[in-house]
Image (cartoon, rainbow, N blue to C red):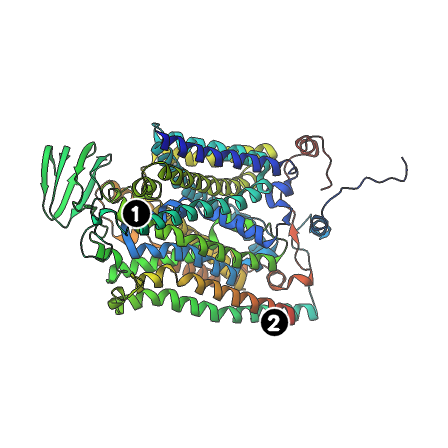
Amino acid sequence: MPGHKRIAVMSPQTRLAHSRRRARGRWRVPKLDGPGADRALVLHRRQLRLAVAPLALLFAGILGLPLVFALFPGLDDIRLLGIPVSWLALAVLPYPALALLAGWQLRRAEKAEDTE
Amino acid sequence: MSAKIWALSGAFAVIIATFYIGWRSSRTASTAQDFLVARRTVRSRRNAAAVSGEYLSAASFLGVAGLVLKDGADALWYPIGFTAGYLALMLFVAAPLRRSGAYTLPDFCEARLGSRALRGLAAVFVVFIGILYVVPQLQLAGQALANILPVPTWVGATVVTVVVIVNVFGGGMRAITVVQAFQYWLKLFAIAAPTFVMCLLFIGNGGLRDGQATTLTEALPPTFTQNTEIDVRTPVLLRVEDPVWLAARGETDGEPAMGTVYWGPGTHEVAAGTTLHFSKGSSVPVVAGAPADNESWLAPASNGGDLFSTYSLILALFLGTMGLPHVLVRFYTNPDGRAARRTTLHVLLLLSLFYLFPIMLGALSRLYVPELLVTGQTDAAVLNLPHSIAPGILGDILGAVLTAGAFAAFLSTSSGLVVSVSGVLSTDVLRGRVRDFRFATAVAGGVPLALAIAVRQTDISLTVGMSFALAASTFCPILLLGVWWRKLTWVGAAAGMIVGGGLVLASLVINTISNLTGGWAPSVFSQPAIITVPAAFLTVILVSKATPAKIPADVAQIRLRMHAPDNLGLTRDRAVASFGTAEERSRLADGRHRKE
């Protein structure tokens, strides 16, 4: 059947992934210069700056908690619904805090990429 | 007996489901792209479920509850560290690493620093970390199966290894993605549903059965809720707070014992093969080193030494997650850097949800299965709890669900690690044909199996903590500095890896020897990260500064690519090593034709 070409049927997502260029030979090929290079450099700096605040908060939280417990042993005796506050602070509190921190950082990092 | 049948069918159902889902999705896996990166088309939510499924190992499913049972508040740091590691991953590594286009950690090392030698070294450490992580999974699998059936522990380890190897042979990464995502939800259900039921029973029973047990807030040791007979299989040193009368058969405190024994406050030694009989209401002796009464169990570490090891543990878990080969490899299945970053957020949410339940189970088991404190085998807490809280058919069903979840944990983590270790072995050590991948898979499964049988079992979370320390001291500095510091050289990276990894391995050896000869080593040897991680970072920086001539010429280009947004189109996915010749591939494709 001349004129007929066999094509592979695939999902749009797969086609998208396949159509992206893939380096076959030496890997370090792409060149970037002019305005693109400046833009990427600015972004690199900005992303690094953005990461400082969440990191500081995280360290303050994680390194601070053991210190708080060491300084205020009375926390073990304060109960909320029969559970000591120190347990709530260790077993429940960190997870929403981590998730909030991550969500905040995600929004900031993506915004930096969109606007820059 | 019926309990055993229930538990066995739970474990069996998980193995069958794993096989079936793996087989269904591996029908379409035929190319090396499928095997290694699932065609890079996995969306962030499914990938997050897969990452979590892979990450929640037996250490999370069984080990966390066991540690809470034994160590109380201090053990709560483990799940926090396990979760917080993903924040570090998101802040610094996920998106740039995905955009670098490299596929494995050794790949990244070579791409960023352009050195074959460094690549080889990285491959060695990937294999080390992988094996160190799989061994305790297999040991616990053996223990779990020995709980159900009258078989020696090596049987369970072998069964899990065989299932994993067969599944990996079938479809590699493509099959594994779906299996792992399924296993996250399975594990969440398997731990959440029994926890809810058992909490309801606990509250319904008026808190504690018959008002016999000590509540968790009193300054007293836990008490037995029923007459309990304990077989001591390995020699233990027990700490007694309240004097206790018991019946013993065997050898205690170096003397043969037969009949009633009185233990005053202090430490008591029990030889292997001794049977101890405690009556209901008597206080529970606790393995030496763990908090002996409930009040100190409840309070977080407050003295200096404990604080030091707490910080060391946090550091290892926080920085080690980004160096785990089986986790990193999953990020390459995302389409781009942005999706990789989103994946980490979803993983954080999924893990946060999961870890609430093992903590609750740990607290419950302090009340209901205190006899585990005597033998020290606290990893069995989750599996033993249902029968002690709800005797009868309900306990059987809950036990079966938990056993199924535990087997999902053994299978998912081991298959993820076996895939990544054998990927590295086959491309970096062997010649990268399909045959090599399969040989590498057999090695990556077989070596941990042999070690799991040969080495004595310790608390799983401690062993896993060691592999986190190894990852944090080897790959974390390379990744962080490789992504963010221009002046990194391959000499510095190699030196840092050798120093950090060498120190961790040395302390692992020292700790093992000390465990066998009476436990003389200070606690820093069991969690050395607080010393080894700064040492590794310092070595990398100093040696890199000393060898500025080795900075790769194209460092600016590479760094720009890692940090440029995806829509600039700079990402070049590295062609993953193609396995096999064209004929070999078409034979594997089973007569079907696919465009590659």
Q: Position of residue B50 (x, y in %)?
A: 53, 48
Q: Nearer the viewer, residue B477 or B37?
A: B37
The answer for how far apart the CA atoms under marks 2 and 1 are is 54 Å
Q: Residue at x 39, y 51 (%)?
A: B357
* Residue ID for mark 2: A42
> Vertical placement of B52 versus B229: above or below?
below
> Vertical placement of A19 versus B566: above or below?
above
Q: Position of residue A8 (x, y in %)?
A: 76, 41
Q: Amino acid at mark 2?
A: Val
Looking at the image, how many numbered discs can be counted on the residues? 2
Which quadrant is home to the N terminus of chain B? top left
Q: Nearer the viewer, mark 2 or mark 1?
A: 1
| SS state under label 2 | helix
Q: Position of residue B392 (x, y in %)?
A: 33, 36
B359 sits to left or right of B569: left
Near mark 2 (Cα within 10 A), the count class, few <14, some 14-19 or many ≥20, is some
Q: Nearer the viewer, residue B579 or B453?
A: B453
Near mark 1 (Cα within 10 A), the count class, few <14, some 14-19 or many ≥20, is many
- Subunit bearing disc 1: B
B212 sits to left or right of B170: left
* Residue ID for mark 1: B365
Which quadrant is home to the C terminus of chain B? top right
Q: Which mark is residue A8?
A: none
Q: Residue at x 18, y 36 (%)?
A: B276
Q: Are marks 2 and 1 in contact (CB under 8 Å)?
A: no
- Subunit bearing disc 2: A
Extreme right residue here? A2
Q: Amino acid at mark 1?
A: Ser
Q: Residue at x 65, y 55 (%)?
A: A28
Do marks 2 and 1 share a chain? no
